[in-house]
Amino acid sequence: MNDNAQRFQPSPAARPDLDWSQVRETVMMLNVAVAQISNAMQDGDESVKTLTESFTAMMDNIAAIQSTLETLPAESRQRDDISRRCDAISGQMQTVIVAFQFYDKLNQRLGHLTDSLASLGGLVASPEQLYNPQAWKALQADIKSRYTLEADKAMFDAILNGASIEEALHLGRKRDESEEDIELF
């Protein structure tokens, strides 16, 4: 970086001067968090894609085995053994489906988090909005409107009503436990 370009750059915390700003430092740290979460989500998505492809191939193999199974004699010990093992694998596949549903829920929450942090960073970086209570209220309403899980909405409300993080997490976990059905989003 040449000397002229360096003079016009805001001063960082490592070399503060009269132009240094804790707001700018906060925004940079929020951006770091957003980038790290986004990167982790992308890594997770790639892993889940691989798992999904493997899962699909295993289901195809089970279907082929079960189709071949029909050609064996009805009262065959081998047929019974193969059938029992196919049923066991199918049961394990149901466990995998539930795990994918939990991953999807995690991914959704992390997506909301990155959006929320990015929106917060934008508000904090804007001198016009930083000290505007209506801008903060609009940000909070926007963030809450993105939540689809009741547990997340409950935690959000609890924090805004003065609950500690631990209290909000406890409330969210209780809500999660009370929601019996897990659906893909």
Image (cartoon, grey):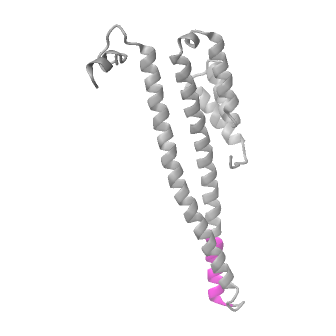
As displayed, is residue 58 above or below residue 99?
Answer: below
- Residue extending farthest to the top is 18
Q: Nearer the viewer, residue 163 or 57?
A: 57
Q: Residue 86 location, x and y as percent?
A: 63, 75
In the image, the segment drawn in magenta is: 76-89
Q: Residue 160 location, x and y as percent?
A: 63, 20
- Does 32 sit left or right of 72 as displayed? left
Q: Residue 84 location, x and y as percent?
A: 64, 77
Q: Residue 112 location, x and y as percent?
A: 60, 34
The answer to which image quadrant residue 56 occupies is bottom right
The answer to which image quadrant residue 92 occupies is bottom right
Main secondary structure of the magenta stretch: helix
As displayed, is residue 166 above or below residue 13?
Answer: below
Q: Residue at x 32, y 20 (%)?
A: 5
Q: Is residue 166 visible?
A: no
Q: Does the segment drawn in magenta span residue 41? A: no
- Residue extending farthest to the left is 3
As displayed, is residue 97 above or below residue 39?
Answer: below
Q: Quadrant of the N terminus?
A: top left
Q: Nearer the viewer, residue 152 or 39?
A: 39
As displayed, is residue 183 above or below residue 11?
Answer: below
- Does 129 sit left or right of 31 as displayed? right
Q: Nearer the viewer, residue 174 or 55?
A: 55
Q: Is residue 15 visible?
A: yes
Q: Residue at x 61, y 41 (%)?
A: 108
Q: Residue at x 67, y 41 (%)?
A: 177
